């Protein structure tokens, strides 16, 4: 299966690229800048001793079976509008959380509904699935870390959701949990600023979730 991480040069993109490549997937990272994507892909490939490709976001979106949109939240909806024709028939995974910093703490700021629902609305697609919102990107991008996290997966198309859950479960130490329909992404997205704020207020390292 071919998985593209669009906007894959940040910390979450790095962690996903490394760990998905180690799980045996054909991985490509995308960027607005072709050279940056190629350099990052070369860097990531050396870290995990796997082959990770790099290209423009445009080309990566066309190439893949599953597109993970790791684009900054304030840019992602415009990105999806521009690439609508390419993405509308693919499984699109949203790890995006809209949040802003106010008085040193993070506040959840959805545009209307969840970011995942907004993406689905633009694409007019039931194949949009939300996942990975609560993964602590810094720890996840460090292969010396073996964090055991749960990933809540929400979506309206059962087949697409099950494919994404299989992808999550293929990553060592992650467990996929069915979070129900896509509208539950509103709850899942809102966990992220809470986890960040707990980390800040208690001066502890990045947090994820594990439901036991």
Image (cartoon, rainbow, N blue to C red):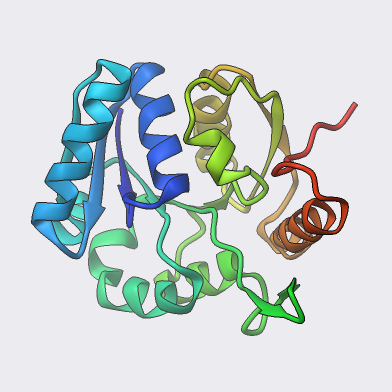
User: In the figure, residue 184 lies in which quadrant?
Assistant: bottom right
Q: Is residue 93 above or below residue 49?
A: below
User: In the figure, residue 31 lies in which quadrant?
Assistant: bottom left
x, y percentage for residue 40?
A: 22, 43
21 relative position to 158: left or right: left
> Does the image show residue 191?
yes
Identity of the residue furthest to the left in this view:
35
Identity of the residue furthest to the right in this view:
212
Q: Is residue 196 above or below residue 210?
A: below
Residue drawn at (39%, 52%) of the image: 10
x, y percentage for residue 142?
A: 49, 30
Q: Nearer the viewer, residue 117 or 206?
A: 206
Q: Nearer the viewer, residue 75 or 86?
A: 75
x, y percentage for residue 108?
A: 72, 73
Q: How many marks?
A: 0
38 relative position to 129: left or right: left
176 relative position to 32: left or right: right
80 relative position to 202: left or right: left
Residue drawn at (16%, 33%) of the image: 42
| Picture quarter with the C terminus | top right
> Does the image show residue 109?
no
x, y percentage for residue 34?
A: 10, 56
Q: Is residue 140 above or below residue 125?
A: above
Q: Nearer the viewer, residue 89 or 8?
A: 8
| Picture quarter with the N terminus | top left
Residue drawn at (58%, 23%) of the image: 145
Q: Nearer the viewer, residue 192 or 103?
A: 103
């Amino acid at each position: 299966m071919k998985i593209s991480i669009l906007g894959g040069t940040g910390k979450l993109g790095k962690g996903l690229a490394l760990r998905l490549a180690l799980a045996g997937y054909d991985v490509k990272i995308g960027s607005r800048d072709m050279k940056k994507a190629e350099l990052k892909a070369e860097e990531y490939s050396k870290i995990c001793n796997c082959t990770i490709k790099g290209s423009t976001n445009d080309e990566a979106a066309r190439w893949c079976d599953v597109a993970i949109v790791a684009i900054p939240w304030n840019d992602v909806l415009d990105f999806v509008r521009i690439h609508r024709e390419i993405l509308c028939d693919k499984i699109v995974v949203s790890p995006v959380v809209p949040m802003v910093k106010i008085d040193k703490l993070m506040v959840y700021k959805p545009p209307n509904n969840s970011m995942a629902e907004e993406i689905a609305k633009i694409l007019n697609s039931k194949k949009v699935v939300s996942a990975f919102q609560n993964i602590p990107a810094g720890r996840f991008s460090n292969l010396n870390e073996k964090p055991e996290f749960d990933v809540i997966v929400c979506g309206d198309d059962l087949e697409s959701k099950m494919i994404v859950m299989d992808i999550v479960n293929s990553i060592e130490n992650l467990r996929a949990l069915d979070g129900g329909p896509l509208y539950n992404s509103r709850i899942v997205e809102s966990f992220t600023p809470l986890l960040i704020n707990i980390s800040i207020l208690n001066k502890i390292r990045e947090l994820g979730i594990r439901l036991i």
